Image (spheres, helix red, strand yellow):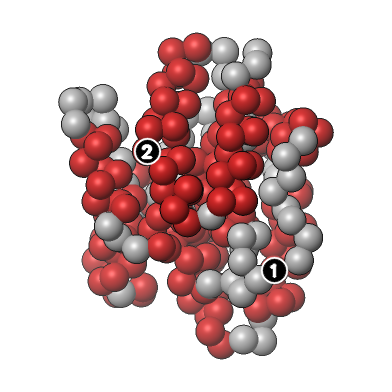
Amino acid sequence: MKNFFQNNNQFFVNQLNIRKRWLNNKRDYKAEKDWEKIKKKINSDKRYNIVKIAYNFSKNMHYEHPGLKSYIYFYHPLRVCILSTKIKEIISPNLMALCLLHNIFETTNIDKEIVKKIFGKKIVSQLEILTVDRNRENKENYKKNYYFRLAKAGDNVIFTKIFDKLDNLYLLRNNKNLKIKKNYLSEIKKFVLPMIDKKSKNLLLHFLNLISFSKIN
């Protein structure tokens, strides 16, 4: 399988431009095209029924995110899911589903009991671990405890967080707020890179190159 995670500036620029258009409330045609290819691969395999359900569930959520229409914001969890299929030859249906759902408790008003009824208690528990409490995230020790719990929650939770951060990191070079940029990179270096180092050495190199790319304004 061709390595998706290339370490050159042109690849990073392409990923950045996709997300810049997304922030301007424009459809992510690349994500749509990639998803159609994935659908063809998994369509006849019953193991991926959970992915199809999660896709439709996530797509029909009403997301609340400043500056983005709900249907446009959906491209973020979709891209996170697509990224999760690039790391292994064998695609994990449970990981894909978790990626599609990863931030519904943070960005929607969905009742957890509905999610539990459809996807089960385990996914709800994983989603709770992934959900950041924005009212507490800047308090002392919150991030440390958050990532400690996350690291103990298993590979699917860990990789979902890694790809969530990666999707945002592709865009960071474009951020003019130096404080936000500094804090985001600090979080990646302190908490995310150690997890990547344990789980995927090739992806670690990609993150390190992307961090260098992101620092340039």
User: Disc 2 or 1, which lies upstream in sequence?
Assistant: 1
Circle 2 sits in a helix, a strand or a loop, which is it? Answer: helix
What residue appears at the point 70 percent right and 43 percent down from the top-left corner? Answer: 27
Residue 87: x and y in percent read: 61, 60
Q: Is residue 10 above or below residue 43?
A: above
Relative to 79, is 159 on the left or the right? Answer: left
Q: Is residue 213 above or below residue 130?
A: above
- Asked whether the viewer can see residue 208, the reply is yes
What residue appears at the point 27 percent right and 31 percent down from the top-left corner? Answer: 137
Residue most extreme to the left:
140
Relative to 123, is 38 on the left or the right? Answer: right
Indicate which disc residue 91 carries.
none
Residue most extreme to the right:
10
Residue 106: x and y in percent read: 34, 44
Residue 153: x and y in percent read: 30, 60
Q: Marks 2 and 1: which is nearer the front?
A: 2
Residue at the spot of label 1: 38
Q: Residues within 10 Å of mark 2 (few under 14, many from 20)?
A: some
Residue at the spot of label 2: 191
Which quadrant holds the C terminus? Answer: top right
Relative to 75, is 104 on the left or the right? Answer: left
- For this rendering, which residue is in front, 109 or 81? 81
What residue appears at the point 41 percent right and 48 percent down from the top-left corner? Answer: 195
Q: In which quarter of the image is residue 111?
A: bottom left
